Image (cartoon, rainbow, N blue to C red):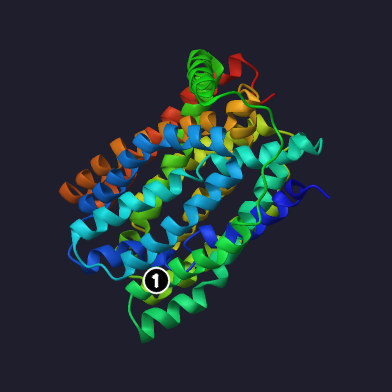
Amino acid sequence: MDRYKQNIKWLTYLSPFRTLSISAAYLTPFFLQYGLSLSQVFLLQSIFSVAFLLWEIPSGLIADRFGRAFSIKLSTPFAVVSMVAYGFSTQFWQFVVWELVLALANGLISGIDTALLLDSLKAEGREHEFVRVSQRINAFGYAATALGVPIAILLVHFVNLSSTLVADGLLTGVGAIFAFKLAEVPRSNGGQEAVRLSAWHAMKQLGSNVEARWLVLLGAVLSTSTYLAFWLSAPYYTHLGIPAVWFSVILAVRSLWKAWLSHRFDQKQHVGRNMIAYASLAGLVYLGMATDQLWLVWVVLGHDAVQALQAQPITAQLNRHMSHEYRATMNSLVNLVQRLIYSLVGPLLGLFVDKTSLSAGFAVAGVMCSTAAFVALARLHRFKTFQ
C-alpha cells in the first residue's frame, strides 16, 4: 500500500497537537502578568506576523522543492523548542526571540499542510471531499482544546500560567510522532531554478486573477475578525466580571461548539448564503460585545462559527486557481496576505483600545470587519463564486 494514502489519517491525528490546546485560554493573561499592555501583546503578534511574512514564500518554495511532508516534519523540532522555552521566559525580548522561532516553525507547515491534504485527496480521486475532510481535521483540533481544559486548570492552580505553554510544547513533541509518518505524494518536478522561476510566474498569475484577489481578501477579513477577538477575549471576560478560573471552561464550551460545527455541517449547498451569514456575524458579534452586557456573553459563539466554517470553502475555491506543482507556495502566499493584515490591524486596534476603551474598540472592529467582508462578497457575486 502506498504510504501517502495514510496522509489524511496522520494529518487528522496531528491536528490536536497543533492547537495550543492547554495554554489557549491563558495566553493573554500570561503576557499581562509580566506587565505587557494590550498594545504590546498585539505588537508581539505583529513581530511574529512580519517574520512569518518574510519566511512564508521561501518556506513554500522549500516545500515545493524538497517535499511537503518533509517541510512539516522539519517544523516540529522548532515548534517544540520555542513553546517550551516560551514557558520559561519572563522578559519582552525573550518573547520576541521565541515568536521568531515560532514563525519559522509555523511557516514550514502553514499552507503546506493544505497542499499535502489536497495532493493526497487528488491522488485518490477524492479532491471534491476537501471541504468535508478539512473540517473534520479541524474538529479534532477544537475537541483537543476542550479536552485540555481540565489539565490547564490543574496546571494554573497548582503550578502557574507559564506551565501551560510548556505542556503545549511537550504535546507538540508527541504530535511529531504523527508528523514523521507523513509521506510525499508522487509528483513531477523540475530543477530548483525552474521551480523558483515557475513559482514566481504562478504567483504573478494568481495575483493578476481578480476573483482570487477578492477571495483572499474575504478570507483575510473573516479570519482577522476572529483573530483579533481571540486576543481581546480575556480582557473582555475580565471587564464583564468573569473570574479567570472560568476562562478555560468558556474556552472548552467554545471549542466543543466549533468541533460540533466542523463535524456537523457539510457545506455543499447554500455556500453563498453561508458566506453572507459569516460576513454578518464578523461584525455583529463585536457590536454585541461592545454593549458590555454579561447576558450577551454568548454572542462570542458567532465568531466561533465564523472561525470553524469560513476558511474551507474559500480555500477550495482559491485552489481551483492554483497550479498543482506550486500549491504549497500559493497557499503560503495566501497566508502571507492574511498575516500582513494581522500585523497592520492588530497593533492599531490594541493601541486604540488602550487609548479609549474595549467597547469602542469592539464597535470599530465590528463595523470595519463586516463592511470589508460584504464589499468582497459583492465583488465575488459577479463571478458567481459561491453559486
Please tell me whether residue 355 is drawn above or below residue 55 in the rendered image: below
| One can see residue 345 in this view | yes
33 vs 332: above or below? below
Residue 202 location (% of width, % of height): 54, 18
Quarter of the view holding residue 224: top left
In the depicted view, which residue is nearer to us: 326 or 276?
326
Q: Is residue 162 left or right of residue 335?
A: left
Which of 122 and 370 lies nearest the eye of the viewer?
122
Callout 1 amino acid: Val
Give the side of residue 6 with respect to residue 318, left or right.
Answer: right
Q: Residue at x 32, y 41 (%)?
A: 51
The vertical placement of 156 against 354, above or below, is below
Q: Quadrant of residue 27?
A: bottom left
Could you tell me which quadrant the C terminus lies in?
top right
Task: Please indicate whether residue 88 sits to the left or right of residue 73 in the image.
Answer: left
**Residue 205 place in picture, x, y as percent:** 53, 14
Q: Residue at x 35, y 39 (%)?
A: 342
- Residue at (25, 43) in percent of width and height: 347
Q: Which residue is found at the position 72% from the left and 36% from the top? A: 186
Crowding at dot 1, Cα within 10 Å, few <14 / some 14-19 / many 20+, comes out as many
Residue 282 versus residue 322: which sits nearer the camera?
A: 322
Q: Secondary structure at mark 1?
A: helix
Where residue 386 sits in the image (x, y, percent)? 66, 26
Q: Picture coordinates of residue 33 (x, y %)?
A: 23, 69
Q: Is residue 36 visible?
A: no
Which residue ends up furthest to the bottom in the rendered image? 158
Residue at the farthest right position? 1
Write down the quadrant of residue 97 in the picture.
Answer: bottom left
Q: How many marks?
A: 1
- Find disc 1 in the rendering and name its residue: 166
